[in-house]
Amino acid sequence: MSVNKHDLVVIGAGPGGYVAAIRAAQLGLNTACIEYEPALGGTCLRVGCIPSKALLEASERYHEAKDGLGEFGIKVENVGLDLPKMLGRKDEIVEGLTSGVALLFNKNKVTRYSGRGRIVARGLVSVSGSAGGSGSAGGSGTDNVEIEAKHILIATGSKAAGLRGVEFDDAVGTSTEALSYSEVPKKLVVIGAGVIGLEMGSVWSRLGSQVVVLEYLDRILPGMDLQLAKDAQRVLAKQGLEFKLGVKVTGVRKQGDRRIVEVEGGEGVECDKVLVAVGRIPNTDGLGLEEVGVHKNERGFVIVDEHFHTNVPGIYAIGDVIGGAMLAHKAEEEGIACVETIVTGYGHVNYDAIPSVVYTHPEIASVGKTEEQLKAAGIAYKKGIFPFKPNGRARALNATEGKVKILADAETDRILGAHILGAHAGDLLAELAVAIEFGASAEDVARSSHAHPSLSEVIKEAALAVDNRALHM
Ligand code: FAD
Ligand code: NAD
């Protein structure tokens, strides 16, 4: 077996790993990245963020063409669904972006190895057997190699969690299957009212499925602002999603082609597809962590310090595999901070300024602390809330649902959190994430000029409302 030498080897080419590899190469490290799947880009590009957003956009356009254009005075007849084409478009977008990562590796001189990475010892990683890819290792065409590197970065991400009593089969699956159903299910049961449940539930509901969402807790979207989560539930229910909260799923029974989702103390729900979306678990199988002594917590996440260093010198970890918010951009920031610390001695992630967006219609977006978190921490705060309804652009867009909520420190006025339910909430939120990063006050945002007519004026009004001086209410 040949032994190749690099300064840094990254295991996993998801948004955490591939971005870390590029940044490390920019900083002058001789960098390698090992990926098991034939395509680069990880969960996010292959079976996560990108394909789900492609289907959310396509299904929203279908739904709008079918039922939403009349109000604009546009008559549309015979709107039809070409599902294979819709799925094909999604696959093309994924293909374009994943092959783009390969180009970025070439441009930045990151050496790509195809196969499964395993940490054999400190400073030594083996690569074996790819999942069916080109088999190119370091561009030299062999699979089984060992890599010597002073620094090893674990960026192996996560996989869908299963549920006790629920076996996966051709009708019961995860988000990966729900991104490619070949027919619109007549009835879809989604287990879990988290981000995946709401996004994929919305996709199939818009395309014609009857969707029932079963959630264990008494609320949807745990962790997000409670008031906006309740508003979102009301809006999504109006769109046709049926929510059953406080429900414990005990199993799924086969009845011919149909499935019965059994729940504790209630009647089972019959359907033809089941999407299990109850969270994700770290991906550390066969990575050699036990052998080299890398510590994991009780839920299996790799434990790191504030510089993403594990307990073993020279071994670092970032992204979904270390837990926290399972978000692509959080993984990216951690990857960058980790390699910058390795090279420059300094790197930092401000977790209070990491935005989070649910791409339903309208979108639900959040950054910083929620009211619930501030109350629990005993932090005194002021809040400003402003609805989209009076906003001129929102009316022109026929998108008046929702509101912006800004939370600011009661004494200093510094923005501590911001939460938006509304059209383009994810894009609008960027301003408030930057405001938090810069330590801005609500008054700073309120005094900044916002274009008219634009949805961003709702943010300005919410910032004014923190000081009880909104203008258009
Ligand atoms: P991953 O993206 O999981 O990448 C890890 C990579 O490591 C994988 O490619 C895997 O094949 C590889 N790997 C694992 N073990 C080995 C090994 N031993 N050797 C070699 N390679 C290995 N986040 C957002 O921010 N926005 C969204 O809109 C969004 N939508 C999502 C939609 C869905 C349906 C799902 C499932 C997730 C979504 N996410 C979204 C979450 C996002 O995908 C993850 O947070 C992100 O991909 C984590 O990045 P990562 O680099 O840590 O891990
Ligand atoms: P999640 O943690 O967002 O939601 C899981 C939901 O399932 C929770 O509401 C939880 O209470 C519920 N649940 C857990 N066990 C249950 C049970 N036995 N019965 C019924 N309900 C149960 O997880 P997810 O939706 O699977 O998404 C996984 C990760 O992927 C998330 O961390 C999310 O951040 C990420 N993701 C992000 C985006 C985005 O940023 N737009 C999109 C999709 C996924």
Image: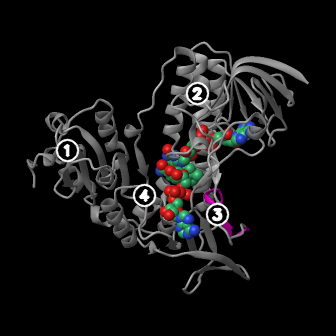
Observer-side mark, 3 or 4, equals: 4
User: CA gap, disc 2 to disc 1?
Assistant: 36 Å
* 391 falls in the magenta region: no
User: CA gap, disc 1 to disc 4?
Assistant: 22 Å
Specify the amino acid type for callout 4: Thr
Specify the amino acid type for callout 1: Glu
* Position of residue 155 in the picture relative to residue 395 (left or right): right
Give the image location of residue 22, x and y in percent: 59, 23
Location of the N terminus by quadrant is top right
Specify the amino acid type for callout 3: Tyr
Give the image location of residue 223, x and y in percent: 42, 55
Give the image location of residue 307, x and y in percent: 53, 28
Magenta span of residues: 169-177
Specify the amino acid type for callout 2: Ala
Name the residue beneath numbered marker 1.
457
Q: Judging from the image, what secondary structure is the residue with disc 1 in?
A: helix
Q: Earlier in the sequence, mark 2 or mark 4?
A: 2
Name the residue beneath numbered marker 3.
181
Q: Is residue 233 above or below residue 39?
A: below
Name the residue beneath numbered marker 4.
360
Circle 1/circle 3 CB separation < 8 Å: no
Name the residue beneath numbered marker 2.
20
Circle 2/circle 3 CB separation < 8 Å: no
Q: Earlier in the sequence, mark 3 or mark 4?
A: 3
Question: Which residue is rendered at x = 13% and y = 44% of the image?
Answer: 464
